[in-house]
Image (cartoon, rainbow, N blue to C red):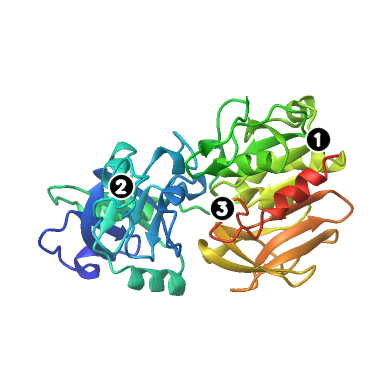
Amino acid sequence: MADPAHTHAPKPAGATGVLVFADGSVAWGRGFGAAGKAVGEVCFNTAMTGYQEVLTDPSYAGQVVTFTFPHIGNVGTNPEDMESHDVPGAIGLVVREDVTDPANFRSTEPLQAWLAARGKIGLSGIDTRALTRRIRVSGAPNAVIAHDPDGNFDIPALLAEAQAWPGLEGMDLARVVSRDEQGEWEGGVWRLGQGYARSPHDPRPHVVAIDYGAKDNIFRNLVRAGAQVTVVPAETSLETVLALKPAGVFLSNGPGDPAATGVYAVPVIQGLLERDIPVFGICLGHQMLGLAAGAKTIKMHQGHRGANHPVKRHADGVVEITSMNHGFAVDNSALPEGVEETHVSLFDGSNCGISVVGKKAFGVQYHPEASPGPQDSFYLFEKFVGMLG
């Protein structure tokens, strides 16, 4: 174990929050939101908007999010911008500036109070540029984030906890964040002044969506594209899925190591492919499809998280500006026969899309439902629903 006396700066006056890394280094700051401690992987997100959606995305389970945009919290929070309810998302966040009072007409609660009510820890006063550089150079580290209004911290104990945490590699978190029961999805996309639309009840192709930790906006966009959606838990059997008579099956996003989730998910997906049922996967669902088709997944050095990632579509060279959140990827250095790469990241050349040859099955690594500005990727929902007949 590293000697904390030699690996961290002394506690400054007024520090009520701390980030203790597994290598023994320490970053002091000002805590806000929930008091307490939590251990996880520290990542960074480059988006300038959408922090509430990020914090409630189940894909961030087990992670502390460092926001590179300095003024997080200024627009407050509201019930409409939740990506999930009563499901673990990010365990905490790190920001540069102290959170100010909300300045947005949609706000119903300040970020500090919203975090406290949901057990999420905030830490401000951190040099987020330096922390982001550290992650880019050395990879996403494990750490404990802690907040004590009185500023009392047992650094050796927090260090021991950070070092004991096994990390996300090999960890199946989909079963932790997935819903427990099957249900019909109700609700369409949101419009200013109108709220969320209701799902139409006209005859529509039936999609069974497997929830590995889904963002609600994905289901809304499936409805917008013309589908009727039934959502089922992550560990739903092939027999149960088939009994619902789906015209197609959607594989959702989610957290953790895809290889670990694939232990129970891959056989189900392979059964769907054998029966030529159309399949569409996003993020973790994309990785699940890749594994089912014989590809491999790898842990990325720093991951991709933000609302400004350029992705090239091989079919025509078009570049989509996308939203991303993933720390694992399909390994495109050795794709098996029968799996074609359809999209690639222009940042680092990593895989961002695949299709299975001879099947109506495809997936993308990014989030076409997120609409980080231009809605470049909504066509994917229309493509999937168009396959359903």
Q: Which residue is found at the position 80% from the left and 67% from the top?
A: 315
Dot 3: within a 10 Å radius of its alpha carbon, few (fewer than 14), some, or many (20 or more) residues?
many
In the rendered view, does 82 fall on the left or right side of 200?
Answer: left
In the rendered view, does 19 fall on the left or right side of 142?
Answer: left
Question: Which residue has dot 2 on it?
Answer: 111
Q: Which residue is found at the position 60% from the left and 50% from the top?
A: 369
Q: Which residue is found at the position 55% from the left and 31% from the top?
A: 179
Mark nearer the viewer, 3 or 1: 3
List x then y, in percent, for residue 149: 15, 47
- Residue 370's disc is 3
Question: Which residue has dot 1 on it?
Answer: 247
Q: Earlier in the sequence, mark 2 or mark 1?
A: 2
Q: Are marks 3 and 1 in contact (CB under 8 Å)?
A: no
In the displayed orientation, state which residue is furthest to the right. 358
Q: Check disc 2 and give the amino acid type.
A: Leu
Task: Give the Cα separation between the discs numbered 3 and 1.
Answer: 25 Å
Position of the N terminus by quadrant: bottom left
Position of the C terminus by quadrant: top right
Q: Earlier in the sequence, mark 3 or mark 1?
A: 1
Helix, strand or loop status at disc 2: helix
